[in-house]
Amino acid sequence: MDFRLELVTVPVSDVDRAKAFYVEKVGFNADHDHQVNEQIRFVQLTPPGSPCSIAIGKGLEDAMAPGSVQGLQLVVADADAARAELAGRGVEVSEVQEFPWGRFVFFKDPDGNGWNVQELPPRD
């Protein structure tokens, strides 16, 4: 049996601001934006090439404070190219950092949710 992680909720304080950040700056695809009722709005966004999406919205994450999710990880082929693309889109992104387990850049969304972008090390 497969257990595939396909959706992660990311708590945000302003849905429109967060959607604009993820779509216009980070380059995620906007899959769905549905106002269920006055209390619930569901927005699904997917990183290019990813089988897993994020959900932002209203009424989705009552127990999670905006900005409380840290360590969400995207994997890329080239950390330098990823950094250049993000910075070119206006994302405040760290310099490339080298670790034995890969090369990374880091950024936060407008609420402070933290993202890691990893280039995997070569496999032997």
Image: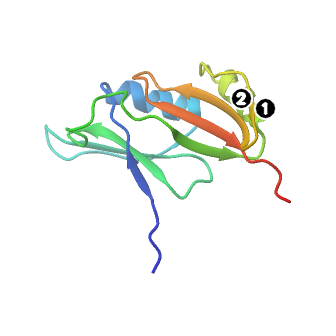
Disc 2 element: helix
Give the labeled residue for mark 1: 80
Image point (19%, 42%), residue name: 40
Identify the residue at the far front of this view: 100
Image point (67%, 41%), residue name: 118
Question: Which label was assigned to residue 83?
Answer: 2
How far across and how far down the image is residue 12, in percent?
Answer: 33, 30
Q: In the rendered image, which quarter contains the C terminus?
A: bottom right
How far across and how far down the image is residue 42, in percent?
Answer: 29, 45
Could you tell whether 4 is left or right of 101 in the image?
A: left
Cβ–Cβ under 8 Å for marks 2 and 1: yes
Q: State the scheme by which the image is colored.
A: rainbow
Work out whether residue 54 or residue 124 is closer to the camera in this orientation and state it: 124
Alpha carbon distance from label 2 to label 1: 5 Å
Disc 1 element: helix
Q: How crowded is mark 2: few (under 14 residues within 10 Å), some or many (20 or more)?
A: many
Given the image, on which type of amino acid does mark 2 rest? Arg
Q: In the rendered image, which quarter contains the N terminus?
A: bottom left
**Quarter of the view holding residue 86:** top right
Q: How crowded is mark 1: few (under 14 residues within 10 Å), some or many (20 or more)?
A: some
Could you tell whether 85 is left or right of 59 in the image?
A: right
